[in-house]
Structures are given as structure tokens and as C-alpha cells.
Image (cartoon, rainbow, N blue to C red):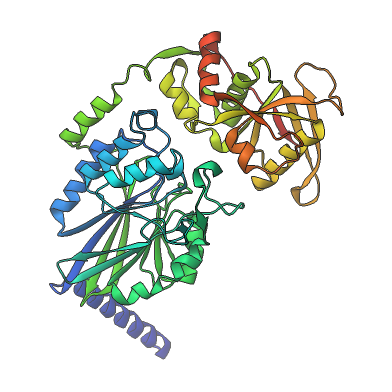
Amino acid sequence: MTMRLKILLSAFLLGSQLTLLAQNQINSSDTTKIILLSLNDQHAKIDNYAQLKALVDKIRADNKYVILLAGGDNFTGNPIVDQYNEKGYPIIDLMNLTGFNATAIGNHEFDYGQDILANRIKQAEFPFLNANIKDASGNYKFKPYTIIHLNNKLRIAIISAIQLGSNGLPDSHPSNLKGLSFEDGIIALKNLNNLRDSSDIFVALTHMGFESDLELAKAMPELNLIFGGHTHTLTKPAKVENGVTIMQAGSGVRSLSKATVCLVNNKVVKIIPEMLNISSYPESDELIAKKLAVYNDNKELNRVIGTARQDISGSNELGSLMTDAVTALDEIDIAFQNNGGIRLDYLKKGPVTVKDIYKLDPFGNEIILFRLTPAEIKSLIKNSYEKADKSIDLQVSGLTYTIIQGRNNKVKKVILKLDSGKKIKKDKLYNVGINSYIASSYIFDHKDSGRSIYLTTAQALINYITKHEVVDYKGIQRTFIK
């Protein structure tokens, strides 16, 4: 046997012995196992909650220590929850019954307004966490962290932060954020790194997005785990960055992040990540199932308002339907809808209900009427394209537009064509309808300050489909890039 082969064999045997030693240590009686579970971006999708509760209960039955967390955006996306007489209450009720230990604050937690959010927080049997939102006095608006004590021996510190957009605000209607100030999430969390010394497991429960979680791991290697949200990322397998395990469970209560944290003498020696499928879990909780049946029995939301001749799918088709509902109003010539406000992938062929419309357009945005020149319309299109990282963001009715790209995919030119076939008049003012989120959050040239017509985009869509009875948008596209 050559010397090189002897060295390689020795190294292999030593590595095997160390692996076996570590495995024995993890499985030894000295090892404590903590199960940390997290889902994120529920968006009020309650229909899988009976399975979620049954799955969590099974894990609790098999393990001594189980912690259940949520990564924010618990609200907005299901009219059964969003249109409830106490907006958002059903998801809080179900989270209480399921036994959540904490949730992050997501940007959509503000969609009902701060007063309603405060009421939901009072009803929750778990804390809402955030370290980078402060009120007008400069004090934390929410609890910046929590420490969970297990058996008077183990301490789990959980910190949290929310994403900020290019305008320095979370992605919610600015009117819902009045009186609040915001700090960079990573900076705010780094200011809490002293909690490492007072905890055995150090967790960041974030709503900043997957890429920001990677940056957080680089900035805070003292963390053991990051459970993330906002980008609806399904980390399968989990990502390990700078020694920190990062997990995010997609969206819509379909998956559940599970991290088995193994400790010896209160020191983390191993983290075993798994992604569990809630949707396919064969058991369901009886009490939750009965609750769901009551919540889903809403005659007004289940009312049929029309028929889709074919599936209406994707941003082009759905956005065209939504904007046509706005230009159907007598005073509006042109309408725009941002892709981020289109919250369904498709409307299925067949009956369309009120519930479908509120799923598609859940935000309660009012229609804002602007009188704009073609140059001002082009500035809206151009800036929306830049905001969306050089991709189409605004769907349209009343015209088509083409973005001509120049160097580095920047906008070289915007070409507008009216649906009527008439030529755009350079000096004419056109009546343009946009939702109140675009009006308050997008940067564009406009001398007119705009005015609300006191009709929501969702109600305009309900009225439009009710009037037309049958809608068909197969293959419709009005926006182009060249």
C-alpha cells in the first residue's frame, strides 16, 4: 500500500469515526431536541387549516418541545377572511386554536388599517413581532423580540423585521402607514444581537424576502435559524448561508418548514431541516373543519355574477379584464392595473362568484381619476417598468403600449396606440383611471393631482361582469417589449 493511499484511508476512517461520534452524540440521552415549525404568507388561505392543525398536533404528540411560528402576511387574499364583519378575525381565531407561538408583521398586516390591526393583535394569543417599525414617538410599535422559555432551562430568542420598498415603506398603501417610521431591517436586527448571550437558540422570523435573508445571514452569523417570508420562496432544500440555516415555506398554507434543533449542554450541535406538505396530509382536525364550514358558508360571497367562457389566466388576460371594468365607466378613457395587485393566477372557466373577484382584487383600492397628457402617461409606463426591474408591470385598457429597449434594457421609447385606432394627440388630456395604490406609490409626471371617484376596483369589476354576463379574454395582450 502506498503512503498516499494509507493517508487517504486514515483520513476516511477518522472522518467516519467523527461522523459516528457526532451521530451518537445527537442521539444520546444528553441531547435535547427542539422542533421549530414555521409557515409564511398565509394570505388568509384558511382551507388547509384542519390538516395543518392535525399535522402540528401529531408532531407535538411525538416531541416534547414544539414551537409554531408564522412569517407574516397572515391577512389579504381570501374574502371569507378579508370581508368578515371583523376583518381578519377568522385567521386569528384559527391561529389561536392551532397554538401559534409568534408571528412576524408582514406588509399586508396593514391592509385593513392600523386600528383594525390593533384589534386583531389584542385577540391573538401570541405576539406580533417587529424591530424596525416605530411610532411617532420613536418607540417600537410592536414587540421587537420575544424569548420563549422551555422547562426553565432552554431559551429561544426570536427577532423580526419587515421589508422596505424603494420608497422606504413596506409594500402597503401609504395611507395605512401614517404615523410610523421605518429602519433598515438588517440594521435593526443587528442591534438585537446581544440576545445571543441570553438565548440557547437564536432565531430571526423575518418578512424581508429571501435575498435579504441571505444578507442577514452574512451580517449575523450568530443566528442559528432564519424563517423568512414575503417572496413566497419554497426552500427545498433549505439554504445554509454563513452557517445559518434559512427556510421559507412558499405561501398559502400549503407547506410547513420544520427544523429539528439538537442541543447538547444547551449548545446547538445540529439543525435538521425538512419541508412538510400540508396539502397532502391525510388527517384533519374535526373542530377546525367545523369552523371552516361555518366561515365558508357566506351566501353573498358565493353569489354567481357571470360566466368565464374559458379560463382567464396570467397577468395579460386578468389585467385586461380588470382594466376593462374601469374603462367601462363613462368618465374614464384609459386604465392601468399593476401586476402586483392581481392576486389570482387564473379565473376558472365557468361560473364567476363575488368571492372570486375579491380573491383576484382583495385590497379595497379606490379608482383615482387623473387627466394626463400622452407624455405623462408614458412617464407612468416608463417608471413602472423601471420599478419592476425592467419588465412589464402595468396592464392596460383603452390603448396598447410598446416599450422599445435601449442599452442595458433601459427604456429608449414608449409607443402608445389607442384602441379606437385614432392617433394619440400630443396635447390632449386623457381621463386615466388607476387604483389608489398606484396613485400613491408610483412616481410619474402629472400636473393633475387626481381625484377619487369613490368606487373600488373590485366593485367596478363585479359591476362589469354582472352587466356582460359572459366574459372571454383568451389570448388578450396589450403590452409589449421590443
Residue placed furthest toward the front: 137
Q: How many marks?
A: 0
Above or below, comparing residue 396 to residue 437 in the picture:
above
Asked if one can make out residue 65 in the rendered structure from this viewpoint, the answer is: yes
Quadrant of the image occupied by residue 37 = bottom left
Residue 165, image x and y in percent? 57, 51
Residue 199, image x and y in percent? 29, 72
Residue at 16% from the left image edge and 33% from the top image edge = 286
Residue placed furthest toward the bottom: 3
Left or right placement of residue 316 versus residue 225 in this view: right
Residue at 21% from the left image edge and 35% from the top image edge = 288
Quadrant of the image occupied by residue 423 = top right
Residue 2, image x and y in percent? 40, 88
The quarter of the rendered structure image containing the N terminus is bottom left
Asked if one can make out residue 1 in the rendered structure from this viewpoint, the answer is: no
Residue 292, image x and y in percent? 25, 30
Quadrant of the image occupied by residue 433 = top right
Q: Nearer the viewer, residue 441 or 8?
A: 441
Left or right placement of residue 64 versus residue 397 in this view: left
Q: Nearer the viewer, residue 307 or 105?
A: 105
Residue at 40% from the left image edge and 59% from the top image edge = 160
Residue at 38% from the left image edge and 48% from the top image edge = 40
Q: Nearer the viewer, residue 305 or 444?
A: 444
Above or below, comparing residue 327 to residue 272 in the picture:
above
The quarter of the rendered structure image containing the C terminus is top right
